[in-house]
Image: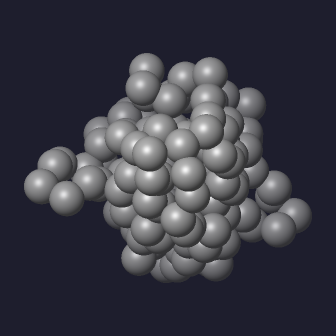
Amino acid sequence: QVQLVESGGGLVQAGDSLRLACAASGYSRYAMAWFRQAPGKEREFVAAISGTGGGTYYADSVKGRFTVSRDHAKNTVYLQMNSLKPEDTAVYYCAADRLSDYVRPSYRYWGQGTQVTVSS
């Protein structure tokens, strides 16, 4: 069983940066991903990193602004978010599983989410 706990969300202004963290227990080098969900919208893929950390994947909307990374020693995955925009406002969720399709929200394990609000 894997448990995921996100942290690092908050209220920032457009153009600011935030770093989200997802601490995992019961960790087994699963692929890990970040999704987000805005009010009234479906959960959408943001970024993912392979189990080894050698592969990273991004939604077009965040490519060049967000960076996903992982620290195996700390069992933690990070999402560095730069040049934030109001449309990045959402609850951000961390997910983990052993799978190859990183984009679909079919992960077995999910965190509780952390709110990110970007004001204009």
Seen from this angle, which residue lies furthest front?
A: 120
Indicate the quadrant where residue 65 lies. Answer: top right
Q: Percent x, y for residue 43?
A: 25, 50
Indicate the quadrant where residue 100 lies. Answer: top left
In the foreground, 112 or 119:
119
Seen from this angle, which residue lies furthest right?
A: 73
Residue displayed at 57% across by 58% down: 12
Q: Is residue 114 left or right of residue 91?
A: right
Q: Percent x, y for residue 31?
A: 56, 47
Instruction: Look at the picture and state if 102 lies above or below 97.
Output: above
Residue displayed at 47% across by 52% down: 118
Q: Is residue 33 visible?
A: no
In the foreground, 5 or 63:
63
Instruction: Look at the picture and state if 46 lies above or below 17.
Output: above
Q: Is residue 108 left or right of residue 119?
A: left
Residue displayed at 81% across by 58% down: 72
Indicate the quadrant where residue 27 lies. Answer: bottom right
Image quarter (top left, top right, bottom left or bottom right) of the C terminus: top left
In the foreground, 78 or 104:
78
